């Protein structure tokens, strides 16, 4: 991203002007942003250009346009969290720690991206932000909850977006939009103040390459005393000098569906890696049937988020979110204890997988992007019932949420496209704190897979 700046061949100001022109020419109503700050971005770009010309850039992201998901505070910009219920909240006086790190590193913060309301689901819509479309197929979802972040990068409107992931909200939209999405180790990117989802909510970048993800982490992965979990020593990268021992699983637990195109591409990747000399070990994860327990915990945390709100403010929330909050509030202590107990046992068994293997490979999603407004394609045998009754998207996208519970780093990479041109991805999971090693392997996989998902021709990549 930055080599052209360093060589003086690409002005950050010209990049920003080009970026805003491309966004203004959004003929497909992609709708990736809730806020754009042209004046502030141009001022930051001009300051970056002066630093590059003086030979004193602030770091690898100096002058690089970066968006912020509208779940994180940016000083002076409203934080709406996709909701109509936040309209009266005051403007933040200070940046969130991750935003401050980006600003200190010279990144050009140019706008806020859409999110599902309070990040509760994986459709790409919210009462405040409206509908965000998938650049590869505008009648389909971009995924969520980091929907605008994924749509922005997929459209080529800047090379990098900061998202958040408490159950798959970076990796699912990355898979649906043909991108790289990283959920780093818990608190690798500092994320105070704590919310009801504190122990499994991660911040993470979306980009078009693993190398760009790595550059983002060089700026973002810093300890901050306001997030005590971030105060751990960072481990250097470096893959072992031997064939890798790779665990893989095509299905998890009681999973009802895996798209045939995804299954075929994933099996091909496993065969290719084995032919390269790596040891591929299929690990049965039929016991990882914890979507109901995970959803009960999720619903209880949503209830906790809004429990002190007055009824008239809760009434402003999306009716589906209100339904999930009621479900969480109706759970008794025994039901929650059983859910936490089963999830804890599953996390302990997952730890055993990583005691014997370097990485775990799974599909990133069970299906390609569903149509707008849907949690899964209509052919999914559970989709209609779940959408009408519980909203439990964990059961429909089962690969991501377990690794929020274990706080491990997980990387989504483009794997292929369906016959209809819908992208899908592969997920690679590593041991906790092994983020750099995960990125090392991710770059190897990326080179092996090649450019499987081109950017939409209507808006070429600007990075």
Image (cartoon, grey):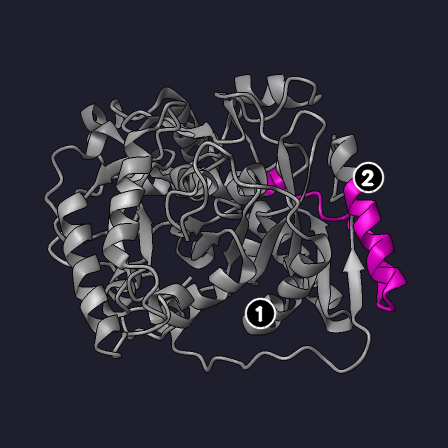
- The residue tagged with tag 2: helix, strand or loop? helix
Which of these two is toward me, 70 or 294? 70
In the image, taking residue 452 as reference, residue 249 lies left or right, namely right
In the rendering, at what x and y percent does residue 375 appear? 55, 26
Is residue 287 within the magenta segment?
Answer: yes
What SS does tag 1 mark? loop
**What x and y, as percent, mark residue 151?**
44, 37
Mark pair 2, 1: CA separation: 29 Å
Which residue is drawn at the image coordinates 11% and 34% (left, top)? 88
**Which residue position is annotated with label 1?**
432
Residue 372: mark: none
> Residue at the spot x=62%, y=70% of the render?
440
Q: Is residue 364 above or below residue 325?
A: below
Q: Earlier in the sequence, mark 2 or mark 1?
A: 2
In percent of width and height, residue 152 lies at 40, 40
- The magenta span reads 264-293
Q: Which mark is residue 264?
A: 2
Mark 2, mark 1: which one is toward the viewer? 2
Q: Residue at x 79, y 61 (%)?
A: 247
Q: Position of residue 250 (x, y in %)?
A: 78, 45
Residue 391 showing in the rendered view: yes
Q: Nearer the viewer, residue 417 or 284?
A: 417
Q: Name the residue rendered at 15%, 51% in the picture.
A: 40
Picture quarter containing residue 316? top left
Left or right, 162 with respect to 347, comes to left
> Of residues 28 and 304, which is closer to you in this image?
28
| 312 part of magenta stretch | no
Q: Residues within 10 Å of mark 2 (few under 14, many from 20)?
A: few
Can residue 187 be seen from the camera position used here?
Answer: no
């Amino acid at each position: 991203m930055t080599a052209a700046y360093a060589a003086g061949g690409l002005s950050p100001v010209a990049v920003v002007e080009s970026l805003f022109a491309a966004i203004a020419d959004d003929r497909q109503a992609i709708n990736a942003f809730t806020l754009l700050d042209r004046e502030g971005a141009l001022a930051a770009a001009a300051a970056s250009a002066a630093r590059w010309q003086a030979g004193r850039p602030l770091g690898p992201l100096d002058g690089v346009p970066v968006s912020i998901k509208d779940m994180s505070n940016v000083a002076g910009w409203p934080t709406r969290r996709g909701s109509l219920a936040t309209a009266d909240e005051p403007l933040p006086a200070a940046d969130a720690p991750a935003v401050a790190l980006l600003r200190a590193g010279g990144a050009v913060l140019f706008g806020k991206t859409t999110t599902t309301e309070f990040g509760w689901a994986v459709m790409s819509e919210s009462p405040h932000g409206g509908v965000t479309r998938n650049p590869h197929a505008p009648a389909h979802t971009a995924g969520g909850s980091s929907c605008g972040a994924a749509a922005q990068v997929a459209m080529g409107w800047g090379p990098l977006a900061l998202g958040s992931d408490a159950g798959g909200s970076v990796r699912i939209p990355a898979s649906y939009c043909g991108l790289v999405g990283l959920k780093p180790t818990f608190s690798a990117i500092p994320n105070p103040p704590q919310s009801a989802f504190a122990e499994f909510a991660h911040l993470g970048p979306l980009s078009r390459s693993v190398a760009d993800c790595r550059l983002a982490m060089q700026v973002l992965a810093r300890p901050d005393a306001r997030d005590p979990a971030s105060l751990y020593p960072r481990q250097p990268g470096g893959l072992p000098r031997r064939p890798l021992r790779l665990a893989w699983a095509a299905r998890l637990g009681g999973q009802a569906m895996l798209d045939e195109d995804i299954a075929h591409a994933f099996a091909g990747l496993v065969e290719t890696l084995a032919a390269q000399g790596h040891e591929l070990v299929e690990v049965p994860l039929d016991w990882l049937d914890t979507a109901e327990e995970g959803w009960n915990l999720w619903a209880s945390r949503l209830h906790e988020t809004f429990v002190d709100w007055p009824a008239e403010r809760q009434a402003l929330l999306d009716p589906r979110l209100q339904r999930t909050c009621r479900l969480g509030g109706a759970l008794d202590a025994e039901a929650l204890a059983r859910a936490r107990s089963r999830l804890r046992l599953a996390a302990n068994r997952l730890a055993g997988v990583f005691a014997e293997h370097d990485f775990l490979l799974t599909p990133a999603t069970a299906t390609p992007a569903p149509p707008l407004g849907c949690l899964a394609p209509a052919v999914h045998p559970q989709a209609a019932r779940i959408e009408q009754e519980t909203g439990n998207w964990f059961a429909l996208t089962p690969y991501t949420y377990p690794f929020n519970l274990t706080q491990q780093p997980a990387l989504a990479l483009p794997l292929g496209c369906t016959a209809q041109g819908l992208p899908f991805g592969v997920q690679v999971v590593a041991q906790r704190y092994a983020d750099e090693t995960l990125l090392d392997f991710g770059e190897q996989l990326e080179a092996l897979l090649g450019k499987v998902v081109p950017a939409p021709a209507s808006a070429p990549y600007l990075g």
